[in-house]
Image: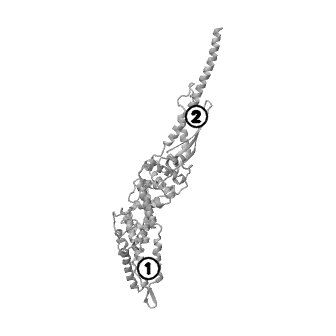
Amino acid sequence: MRKGYITVFLTLSLTLILSLVFTVIEGARISAIRMKFECVTDIGMNSVLAEYHRELLEQYDLLFVDTAYGGTHPDIGNTEAHLRDYMKKNVREEGRSGWGIRDFLDMDIQAAEITAYSIASDEEGAVLKRQVTDYMADYPLGAVLEKINLNTGLLQEYGLDSRDIDGERRQHEAQIEEIGLPEKEVEPGKFEKVPLDNPADAANATRGSGVLNLVLENPSQVSTVKVDTGDYISYRSRLQGTGLCAEAAGICGEPNELVFEAYLFEKCGYYGQELDKSLLKYQIEYILSGQDTDWQNLEQVSKRLLKWREAANVIYILSDGAKVAEAEAMAMALAAVAMLPALTEPVKYTILFAWAYVESLQDVKTLLGGGRVPLRKTAADWKTGINSIKNVRGSLTEEKGGNGLNYKEYLQIMLFLQDKTSRTYRAMDIMEMDIRRTPGNARFRLDGCFDTYEARLSVTSGFGYDYEMTRKYGFY
């Protein structure tokens, strides 16, 4: 009787003990499933980020994942497949099935769906510029940015980008037309106007020749590389992500346009500082002009330089009494020959404007040759004489050194004044051009690249458990 009592007691005790043990084991299983789900998610999402584009990092110090993975069709679905594959490989224990052995967790991936992702070109390039701001954070940019701000302020204060010098010149030429020229009889009943022989006409006749043809000793040395602009991000329809990640934006703050400009000068070439890796040799000029050839981009920048310098030189020459007196003496001589004293004043101004134009061509030649030209000149900075307007090409000389700003600093002002949207997209054009020159990247697209993504993940267990989580990972 006592033995039977003990057996029943032990049986009841073992039932309670085993229930507790099985409950602890099941609790351990549940905790292990959750913990493994967290670990597998971390491994899988970081593994996706580990597939960042190597050439983009090498050339531009940017971390993005290309959803085309070297192919021709970028698609976030490709990344979802990669994420699912990474998680599957880590969620199950390979080689442990069969012979009655069962995985203690018996987990499988139910879903791996990317619900949000930041494409490089989203929000007019804000995603890309956020990374640029992060990359440039440790660079000592203070003095450089202050100088750009100062030079841009001076240029705007002087009105060099807004003054219509060409319109003013035409007004003086119209005054000459209104006064008219004397006529002489060349045949009975046939009269011709007596030519004025205004030397300003010779200078103005060169205006249609192209700036580069006038200022370069050997224009044939200018790069003639041509690209199909329609194939790049500025011109084609773009893929869209879900915009700039709030967490990344919060860490790095608002992208600074001056910082982005400094970044472009670090990574891009320009006339006189070309890069071997680049397709277009004058990359900054392309960002400014957006033309499909190096020649056209450099020509457009040179025209703008000429406009600025002509405005500055007209301002100076009209204030220089000695130069005004020289022009007036020449104009008086021409008016005396024509026997029309009223021509003196308008002819004087056409000569002064032509002289400023030739001086401006000299300035552009100096800048492209590596010299410096101040925004506003003094008598000591002036290079050409009044007779230069009679022989424009022959009067231009090679000039090195000097004071003022160099070509790069003028480009910096142009970039600062440029519309930020066109500047950003053209900079991305340049990146695509250069990355496509590398092996395996012939169809590379920045609008197929992301740096931050959010995924909804779920797992199921053969023991009847299902879990779901949403996580956000990225380069920030």
Amino acid bearing label 2: Asp
Which mark is drawn over residue 147? none
Q: Is residue 90 left or right of residue 58?
A: right
Residue on which the image places disc 2: 108
Residue on which the image places disc 1: 346
- On-image quarter of the N terminus: top right
Pick whichever, 422 or 226, lies toward us: 422
Q: CA distance from mark 1 to mark 2?
A: 89 Å
Residue farthest toward the top in the current orientation of the protein: 1
**Mark 1 or mark 2, whichever is nearer to me:** 1
Question: What is the crowding at mark 1: few (fewer than 14 residues within 10 Å), some, or many (at least 20)?
Answer: many
Counting every numbered tag in the picture gives 2
Q: Is residue 338 above or below residue 350?
A: below
Q: Is residue 421 above or below residue 357?
A: above
Q: Is residue 190 above or below residue 79?
A: below
In the rendered image, residue 180, in percent from the top left (x then y), is placed at: 46, 83
In the rendered image, residue 90, in percent from the top left (x then y), is placed at: 53, 34
Pick whichever, 387 or 90, lies toward us: 387
Counting residues from the N terminus, which is met first, the one under dot 1 or under dot 2?
2
In the rendered image, residue 235, in percent from the top left (x then y), is placed at: 52, 57
Q: Is residue 194 left or right of residue 69?
A: left
Amino acid bearing label 1: Pro
Q: Secondary structure at mark 2?
A: strand
Pick whichever, 260 or 53, lies toward us: 260
